[in-house]
Image: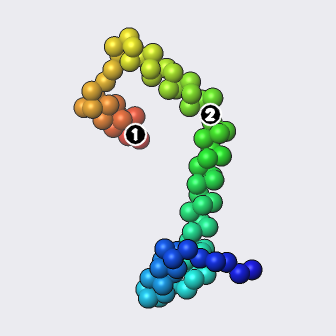
């Protein structure tokens, strides 16, 4: 397969080559980033209902004035993350 590279993409490959990376390594790294984005997207889609419910609950709490300031949130986070 032969690909035509945009000039900015060729500059990335050239820079990577100067740093010791091969074009294959650059592409491997690029594909790894793309795959991670797809995994994150899949997670978001799979948990869409749960995420939406949490956002809705938080919005309702905010409307009722049940907000925490940053200090309170950090304090709660520290208490729940301790073994």
Say whether residue 16 is visible. Answer: no
Question: In the image, what residue occupies the spot 48% across and 84% down?
Answer: 14
- Is 9 located above or below residue 71 in the figure? below
Give the camera-side residue of 9 and 24.
9
Identify the image quadrant of the C terminus: top left
Say few, some or many: other residues with alpha carbon within 10 Å of mark 2 (under 14 / 14 to 19 / 20 or more).
few
Q: Give coordinates of residue 82: x percent, y percent.
A: 38, 40
Q: Residue at x 55, y 74 (%)?
A: 6
Q: Is residue 40 visible?
A: yes
**Disc 2 to disc 1, C-alpha distance:** 25 Å
Query: Pointer 2: what residue?
Result: 48
Residue appearing at x 61%, y 67% in the figure = 31
Q: How crowded is mark 1: few (under 14 residues within 10 Å), some or many (20 or more)?
A: few
Q: Position of residue 13 (x, y in %)?
A: 51, 81
Answer above or below: position of 67 versus 64. Answer: below
Q: In this view, does 64 lie to the left or right of 11?
A: left
Are circles 2 and 1 on residues that touch, CB within 8 Å?
Answer: no
Residue found 57% across the figure and 69% down from its top: 30
Q: What element carries label 2?
A: helix
Residue 9: x %, y % from top left: 52, 74
Which of the 4 image quarters holds residue 43?
top right
77 sits left or right of 5 in the view:
left
Q: Name the residue under label 1.
A: 81
Front one among 15 and 29 = 15
> Left or right of 11: which side holds 1?
right
């Amino acid at each position: 397969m032969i690909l035509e590279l945009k000039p900015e993409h060729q500059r990335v490959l050239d820079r990577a080559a100067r740093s010791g990376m091969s074009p294959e390594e650059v592409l491997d790294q690029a594909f790894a980033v793309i795959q991670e984005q797809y995994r994150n997207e899949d997670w978001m889609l799979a948990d869409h209902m749960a995420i939406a419910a949490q956002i809705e609950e938080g919005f309702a709490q905010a409307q009722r004035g049940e907000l925490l300031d940053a200090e309170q949130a950090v304090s709660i986070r520290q208490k729940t993350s301790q073994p």
